[in-house]
Image (tube, helix red, strand yellow):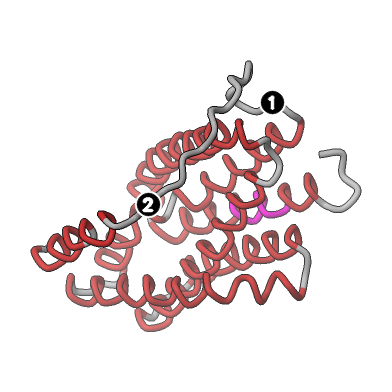
Amino acid sequence: LLLGSGLAALSIFPAAFLSFSAEPPRRTEKRLYPRSPFIYAFLIALFMWSIGTGGFNPFFNAYFSRFFHMSVESIGSLFSYGQLAQVAAILLTPALLRKIDDIRGIAYMQFATAAMLCLLAWARQPALAAVLYVAYVCFQYMSEPCLLSMLMSHVNPAEQSGASGLNFAVVAAASILAASAAGAMFARFGYPPTLATCALVTASAAALFFWLFRPGANT
């Protein structure tokens, strides 16, 4: 923790040498938050996606600790491997999207996320579950920068801050609801049924996303 804090503090020095060009004053817009069929459809799909993933993410460490009896050190190592794999996966995302269009690419990554959750629900070996978890976080975080980029490309520059605020407000609200519901389900039904439910919601979110934004859709 001390080393991490020290590294974060060192960022002050390169930041001190950054310079930004002065922007001309922008004309005040009447509407800060975007309003369009695309925005409403996007936020609905994002809400369902965040419900599906938000039911497992806060409890992954409890899942490996209580269900697989992994040590704290092993869970910490698994989390680190997942973070490293995310970096590589995000860097590979542009190459993937060049081969297929953005909508299909995002939907495929969301379906893959749901598949990893489903397999996690039935995994009984810690090593297999660890591999599935790393694959899960890779697919999940490969899609999220694409979603934000898609949102920003469909709003005016003056509305981008409002769109970003709506994006993160929906994610936060869905995550709170999902964590509350999943916590109660874990206590009553156990981990496999709850993970299977999260997988079903995530797959439904992927299907909804593709249906709403497929080529030729009104949004």
Q: Residues within 10 Å of mark 1 (few under 14, many from 20)?
A: few
Looking at the image, do the residues carrying marks 2 and 1 touch, with CB atoms under 8 Å apart? no
| Occupied quadrant, residue 94 | bottom right
Residue found 40% across the figure and 55% down from its top: 57
Which amino acid type corresponds to the residue marked 2 in the rendered image? Ser
Which amino acid type corresponds to the residue marked 1 in the rendered image? Arg
Residue found 57% across the figure and 76% down from its top: 92
| Occupied quadrant, residue 185 | top left
Q: Is residue 206 left or right of residue 180?
A: right
Which numbered disc covers residue 35? 1
Q: Where is residue 130? Give x, y as percent.
A: 38, 77
Q: Is residue 90 left or right of residue 101?
A: left
Q: Main secondary structure of the magenta part?
A: helix
Decide: is 106 above or below 219: below
Q: Where is residue 192? Give x, y as percent.
A: 45, 61
Q: Which residues are magenta?
A: 202-207
Q: Is residue 38 magenta?
A: no
| Occupied quadrant, residue 60 | bottom left
Which numbered disc covers residue 171? none
The extreme bottom residue here reads: 127
Q: Which residue is mark 2?
A: 19
The extreme top residue here reads: 30
Q: Where is residue 112? Give x, y as percent.
A: 62, 68
Decide: is 86 above or below 39: below
Q: Is residue 88 left or right of residue 126?
A: right
Residue found 38% across the figure and 76% down from its top: 84
The quadrant of the rendering that contains the N terminus is bottom left
Considering the numbered disc 1 on the image, is that residue within a helix, a strand or a loop? loop
Mark closer to the chain start, 2 or 1: 2
Q: Where is residue 193? Give x, y as percent.
A: 48, 56
Distance of mark 2 from mark 1, alpha carbons? Answer: 34 Å
The quadrant of the rendering that contains the C terminus is top right
